[in-house]
């Protein structure tokens, strides 16, 4: 029980304190403190999974552990980044920013530990709402527009997810046993007796609803604006943590469908949306002048890869879950360094930012390495996961899918390369457009740490990690826990 | 003896009830505005006065123009024969509800024809507005009739428009009432669809169609229009009030007509006429209400 | 009770239809308040198994929240806005009304086809919930002013809540509270953003929010 309290309570308390404190200088320090406690709790979970609590409402299984780990790592690193970042942006009131960051961590933990689909929804909605002030941190006209689109589309998607949750309840009725019908364990136990049309409808709505939060095409249109206007840290959290959290919602829906024998129906939909997302991302990444929007489309692409992986069967699920981690870490690097470059040049388009290597050398190098990593080159971690997905496609005889996958990856590589290389190489304009801020230590530690993790996992996957990944893939595809 | 009493009472009803109702509406509006208002039977005095006058016919008009008022009054009288006014109707048969609706349609048709016959652009404008609104009010009327007919299991006006008990009786009755009230306001040129007291031709709908009629023709038109109002209101009343003790069905009808007249007066006093683009929306809402009532009854 | 729930559901669906045809911002907010009040009373009217005290509490909470608090928040958000009318929606008012009527019909047809398990509360609840959801979505995507988009979202949420009512299973009160709280916080956040939009652009028309694109 203490683990759950730490996971949920520490960030919540930190957020509340951040709301109440008046000193801008002290506030950011609560974030790393809370994140450290959170990470400690997650490490304890890796050592030994905690017992279920609150009569089975809270339980951490392998899938949840993966998402929790990613969230914890990203938050820990970003909270350290924030210390320096918020000091640089002292002109802004950071009360809401710090508080909402903490609340997001608490909400994401709730989504992970919750075994009740309704509670999962509540957590997801809370995370969505808590992220809105982050997007609006820059307080200019464009960020207002981005926040509005984010709120509208996000709310619509979350509403549809709630409808899907109700459909799930309808699928299991009439239910007279112990426990709540919307508990995942109850749904898995009664999987054979679920009403198929309601379950199919539930999966569709949950996929569309949580897919909107993930950013799968065709529900992705809010992503470029939101990621483009949010500060780099917010982008890292949004792209790394919240999308993974939403993916967890989709995974839970898939888990139930697989247990009920609808795995093929679900997989077909996932493959379709995965390829569509990759195609849309490819189409818009070419010629993208704004490198933050480019990263948003890259996020759409990788969400598509995740969906595709799960849709390809158990082997693909293993790869997709590994990719969840890899993508999150690499996106963290990319967004944090993009934020640094944006600040150094005062603009985020190719016209403003040229020759980042001259002005912010380490950030630019990390940005370049991040680009290489995210497009799937060895020796970085995403290569392993993307290659595994490709192999599972080929092994399963789905050559069309494999061909499309590789082709789209190639197109995206070319598209991103033009933007990234133009930003990184070359000579900067004579007059710096914004305040020249070179590389600051704290703000480099974060992406450096993440990058080393990416390289580490690209070279060696520890035993414990593969075991958890395998367990998660088994859970996902219908083997009872 | 029975037949004589009923014939005499029918004749009295047809002659006086329209004017009484119009008078009550005018008195209500006056009372709300703090005035005394015209005498209750003012429209009757107008009709009598008009009957004594001569008529002037434009040289562009043909026999259609002379036909209009006559046919519209006859159609209203024929509909009155069918309508159950305070007791069983004079003539009743299965399907008389359809005839009832179509008689009003006939009256509207000849009025529109007479208006177009004058060749004047004002009447043409009124005619086009009238037809546009009727094309939306008719479906509302038909759908509410359909719902009530299905509920009562018959197409006879007497049985359709009586108090019904059963599942979803209250909701479907309220919906039919609402829809029919809006249709009544639209068909009888009441606010919020049309202002009967306006003097500006550009804002008229029904008034402008009969602008060129004079003398006995206008008397027929006024009588016919008043009768139409009484008949449609009687349908509304029968949905809600059946037999009352002491006064019987006839007394209940009289009381109901009085209440409907007061209600119309209150609606007219509290609202302004809607903008012309808003009237179709109101009528679509009436269609939805009656359709919903039909759905409720069908389930 | 059955009659009362039927009346309330009819009123709810017609209020949604009225919203589709209304152009006044304050008028829309008032209609939304009325719809929220109906929704608050509805659980009491369709309850068949006897009253728990928590049904009263939840009904009262919803009544107050959706009938008073949320409309207040919305009106406060547009306190600085001068133009209180929606002038040119993407789908015109008459077309919206006709489309809304069509959606009501479609939802009845869909509800007939749905394989609903036994024990469902009212025959009218599922069609009305589907119709309200669809009309809310129509409002969200066809309106230009930010406030009417939020009202469309709230109508959409009302429809989903109605659907939840039709499930013959008591959603744990914690979840219901959570959903209610989430909707309130969402409206609160949206209200704040609308206020910022009003201040930055001097209008709440989302036509001004079109500078970001590819």
Image (cartoon, coloured by chain):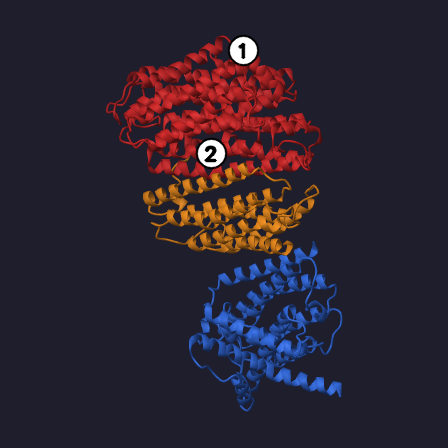
Chain colours: A red, B blue, C orange
How many other residues sit within 10 Å of disc 1, few (<14), some (14-19) or many (≥20)? Answer: few
Q: Nearer the viewer, residue B70 or A174?
A: A174
Answer left or right for C207 relative to B99: left
Q: Position of residue A423 (x, y in %)?
A: 35, 21
Residue A316 versus residue C30 in the image, above or below: above
Tell me the number on the disc at residue A464: 1
Q: Residue at x 48, y 64 (%)?
A: B276
Q: Nearer the viewer, residue B118 or C123?
A: C123
Residue A200 versus residue B200 in the image, above or below: above
Q: Nearer the viewer, residue A431 or A331?
A: A331
Q: What subunit carries mark 2?
A: A
According to the image, label 2 marks what residue? A126
Q: Residue at x 53, y 31 (%)?
A: A120
Residue B263 versus residue B144 in the image, above or below: below
Q: Position of residue B281 (x, y in %)?
A: 53, 59
Task: State the SS at label 1.
Answer: helix
Q: Residue furthest left?
A: A431
First in sequence, mark 1 or 2: give its number.
2
Q: Nearer the viewer, residue A456 or B257?
A: B257
Question: How many badges with numbers are in the image?
Answer: 2
Task: State the SS at label 2.
Answer: helix
Q: Residue furthest bottom?
A: B52
Can residue A286 be seen in the rendering of this structure?
Answer: no
Q: What subunit carries mark 1?
A: A
Q: Quadrant of the C terminus of chain A?
A: top right
Can residue C178 be seen in the rendering of this structure?
Answer: yes
Q: Position of residue A468 (x, y in %)?
A: 56, 15
Q: Quadrant of residue A431?
A: top left
Residue contact at pointers 1 and 2, CB within 8 angstroms: no
Q: Residue at x 75, y 69 (%)?
A: B94
């Amino acid at each position: 029980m203490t683990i759950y309290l730490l996971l949920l309570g520490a960030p919540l308390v930190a957020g509340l304190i951040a709301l109440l404190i008046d000193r801008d200088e002290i506030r950011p320090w609560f974030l790393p403190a809370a994140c450290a406690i959170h990470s400690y709790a997650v490490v304890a979970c890796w050592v030994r999974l905690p017992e279920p609590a609150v009569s089975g409402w809270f339980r951490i299984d392998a899938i949840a552990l993966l998402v929790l780990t990613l969230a914890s790592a990203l938050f820990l690193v970003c909270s350290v980044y924030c210390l320096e970042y918020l000091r640089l942006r002292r002109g802004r009131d950071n009360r809401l920013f710090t508080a909402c960051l903490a609340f997001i961590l608490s909400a994401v933990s709730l989504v992970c530990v919750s075994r009740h689909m309704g509670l999962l929804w509540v957590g997801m909605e809370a995370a969505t709402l808590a992220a809105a002030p982050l997007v609006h941190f820059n307080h200019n006209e464009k960020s207002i527009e981005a926040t509005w689109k984010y709120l509208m589309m996000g709310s619509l998607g979350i509403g549809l997810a709630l409808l899907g949750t109700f459909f799930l309840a309808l699928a299991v009725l009439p239910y007279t046993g112990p426990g709540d019908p919307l508990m995942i364990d109850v749904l898995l136990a009664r999987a054979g007796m679920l009403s198929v049309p309601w379950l199919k409808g539930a999966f569709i709505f949950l996929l569309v609803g949580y897919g909107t939060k993930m950013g799968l095409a065709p529900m992705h249109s809010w992503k470029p604006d939101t990621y483009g206007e949010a500060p780099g840290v917010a982008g890292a959290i949004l792209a790394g943590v919240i999308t993974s959290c939403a993916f967890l919602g989709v995974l839970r829906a898939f888990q139930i469908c697989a247990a009920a024998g609808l795995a093929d129906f679900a997989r077909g939909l996932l493959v379709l949306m995965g390829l569509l997302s990759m195609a849309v991302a490819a189409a818009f990444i070419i010629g993208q002048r704004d490198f933050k929007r480019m990263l948003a489309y890259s996020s759409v692409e990788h969400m598509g890869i995740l969906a595709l992986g799960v849709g390809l069967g158990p082997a693909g699920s293993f790869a997709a879950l590994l990719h969840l981690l890899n993508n999150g870490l690499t996106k963290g690097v990319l967004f944090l360094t993009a934020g640094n470059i944006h600040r150094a040049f005062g603009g985020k388009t190719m016209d403003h930012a040229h020759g980042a290597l001259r002005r912010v050398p380490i950030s630019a190098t990390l940005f370049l390495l991040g680009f290489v990593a995210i497009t799937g080159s060895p020796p970085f971690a995403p290569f392993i996961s993307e290659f595994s997905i490709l192999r599972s496609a080929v092994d399963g005889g789905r050559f069309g899918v494999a061909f499309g996958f590789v082709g789209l990856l190639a197109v995206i590589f070319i598209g991103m390369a033009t933007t990234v290389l133009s930003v990184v190489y070359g000579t900067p304009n004579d007059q710096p457009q914004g305040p020249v801020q070179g590389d600051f230590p704290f703000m480099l530690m974060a992406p450096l740490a993440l990058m080393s993790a990416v390289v580490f996992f690209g070279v060696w996957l520890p035993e414990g990690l593969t075991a958890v990944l395998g367990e998660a893939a088994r859970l996902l595809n219908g083997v009872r826990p | 003896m029975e037949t004589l009493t009923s014939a005499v009472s029918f004749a009295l009803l047809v002659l006086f009830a329209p004017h009484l109702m119009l008078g009550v509406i005018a008195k209500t509006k006056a009372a709300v505005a703090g005035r005394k208002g015209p005498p209750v039977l003012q429209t009757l005095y107008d009709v009598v006065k008009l009957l004594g006058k001569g008529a002037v016919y434009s040289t562009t008009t043909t026999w259609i123009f002379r036909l209009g008022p006559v046919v519209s009054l006859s159609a209203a009288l024929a509909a009155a024969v069918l309508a159950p006014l305070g007791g069983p109707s004079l003539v009743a048969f299965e399907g008389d509800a359809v005839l009832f609706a179509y008689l009003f349609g006939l009256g509207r048709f000849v009025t529109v024809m007479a208006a177009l016959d004058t060749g004047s652009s004002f009447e043409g404008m009124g005619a086009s507005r009238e037809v546009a609104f009727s094309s939306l009010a008719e479906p509302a009327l038909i759908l509410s009739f359909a719902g009530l007919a299905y509920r009562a299991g018959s197409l006879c006006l007497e049985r359709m428009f009586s108090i019904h008990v059963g599942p979803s009786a209250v909701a479907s009755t309220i919906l039919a009432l609402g829809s029919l009230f809006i249709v009544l306001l639209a068909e009888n040129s009441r606010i919020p669809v049309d202002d009967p007291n306006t003097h500006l031709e550009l804002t008229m709908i029904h008034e402008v169609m009969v602008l060129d009629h004079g003398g006995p023709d206008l008397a027929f038109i006024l009588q016919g229009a008043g009768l139409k109002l009484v008949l449609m209101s009687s349908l509304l009343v029968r949905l809600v009030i059946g037999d009352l003790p002491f006064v019987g069905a006839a007394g209940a009808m009289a009381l109901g007509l009085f209440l409907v007249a007061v209600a119309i007066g209150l609606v007219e006093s509290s609202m302004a006429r809607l903008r012309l683009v808003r009237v179709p929306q109101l009528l679509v809402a009436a269609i939805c209400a009656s359709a919903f009532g039909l759905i409720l009854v069908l389930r | 009770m059955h009659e009362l729930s039927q009346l309330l559901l009819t009123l709810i669906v017609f209020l949604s239809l009225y919203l589709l045809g209304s152009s006044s911002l304050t008028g829309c907010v008032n209609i939304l308040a009325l719809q929220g009040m109906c929704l608050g009373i509805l659980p009491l009217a369709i309850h068949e198994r006897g009253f728990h005290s928590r049904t009263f509490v939840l009904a009262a909470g919803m009544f107050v929240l959706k009938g008073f608090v949320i409309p207040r928040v919305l009106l406060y958000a547009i306190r600085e806005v001068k133009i209180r009318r929606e002038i040119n929606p993407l789908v015109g008012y008459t077309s919206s009304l006709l489309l809304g009527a069509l959606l009501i019909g479609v939802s009845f047809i869909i509800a007939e086809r749905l394989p609903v398990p036994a024990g469902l509360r009212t025959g009218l609840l599922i069609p009305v919930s589907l119709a309200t959801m669809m009309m809310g979505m129509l409002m969200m995507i066809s309106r230009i002013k930010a406030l009417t988009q939020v009202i469309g979202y709230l109508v959409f949420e009302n429809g989903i809540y109605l659907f939840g009512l039709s499930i013959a299973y008591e959603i744990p009160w914690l979840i219901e509270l959570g959903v209610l709280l989430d909707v309130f916080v969402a409206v609160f956040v949206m209200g704040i953003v609308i206020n910022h939009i009003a201040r930055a652009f001097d209008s709440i028309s989302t036509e001004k929010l079109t500078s970001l694109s590819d």
